[in-house]
Amino acid sequence: MIKSLFNVTRPTVPIFVRRPGSGVAAACDCDAASDVARWARSDLEFPVRRVYCVGRNYREHAIEMGGDPDIVETPFFFQKPADAVVVCDPTATTATTTACRVPYPPMTSSLHHEGELIVVIGSDGLRVRVEDAMDMVYGYAVGCDLTRRDLQDEAKRGGRPWDAAKGFDHGCPMSPIVPKRDFEPSEDTRIELTVNNSPRQASTLGRMIHSVPEIVSNLSHFFALRRGDLILTGTPAGVSHLSVGDAVSITCGDLIPCRFVVGEPE
């Protein structure tokens, strides 16, 4: 019998469901207690297969990165490794997970935050039509596309890939997942990121250049999407530096927030 050389398992993300009687909302101004209390952890976890990311998908962010949002192009994608995912569960009570810590990565002096809505793929599909794309979506989460901006800028100047800038360890902190039956995003749903309680990024999902169905459909023409895939849908304007000790909070409507602290380098 042939045996595997290593016992390797996929990263998993917990799935939360809405508590009975708490209602379904697309957007709300929630306080830190209520935005967690309305959710209950289920007995299911989501095994992560791949992490796809969309570049420059908010008009204002495209401008701040030197692009022209009025030139409509097909979305462009890059990936992060699945084991870059760090689950930041604000409902956890153990000493090691209450304050989710993400170590400052090596080889950079310019770590940037990029708060994003995450689309969770729950069925397989290849060359999916836009009108059928939402059938593939299992749910949503919110997270951060952490970026070594100095390495990204250097790669851009040299015409090289962004792997070192985007695909590092702990580079994708995210919240638990919420099934789509419990969360209905709309164009008015707000996405916000704060650092040490100070606003850094704020927009609405309606400011996306490419919608969620368009993203899923377009991506499925490049890759066969599978259950277990995550898609980070782009970030609003306001990306900026993070330092050791910074406390980051990302919210999107009444999804479970993603909160973490930037820790010392490993």
Image: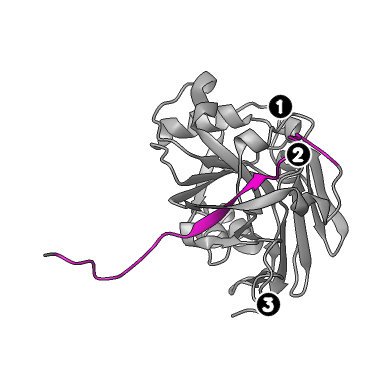
Q: Which mark is residue 70?
A: 1
In the rendered image, the residue lying farthest to the front is 20
- Assign a secondary structure to mark 3: loop
Give the answer, above or below, for where 128 lies relative to 29. above
Where residue 239 sits in the image (x, y, percent)? 75, 53
Closest to the camera, between mark 3 and mark 1, is 3
Q: Earlier in the sequence, mark 2 or mark 3?
A: 2
Q: Earlier in the sequence, mark 3 or mark 1?
A: 1
Q: Which circle marks residue 95 in the picture? A: 3
| Relative to 78, 174 lies left or right | right
CA–CA distance in space, label 2 to label 3? 31 Å
Q: Is residue 265 left or right of residue 187?
A: left
| Residue appearing at x 61%, y 71% in the figure | 105
Magenta stretch bounds: 2-28
- Which mark's residue is nearer the viewer, 2 or 3? 2
Q: Quadrant of residue 94?
A: bottom right
| Location of residue 207 in the rendering, given as x and y in whole percent from the top left corner | 75, 32
Amino acid, disc 1: Asp
Q: Which residue is mark 2?
A: 21
Q: Magenta segment, principal secondary structure?
A: loop
> Where does residue 204 sit, x and y in percent of width and height?
78, 36
**Amino acid of disc 3:** Ala
Q: Is residue 74 visible?
A: no
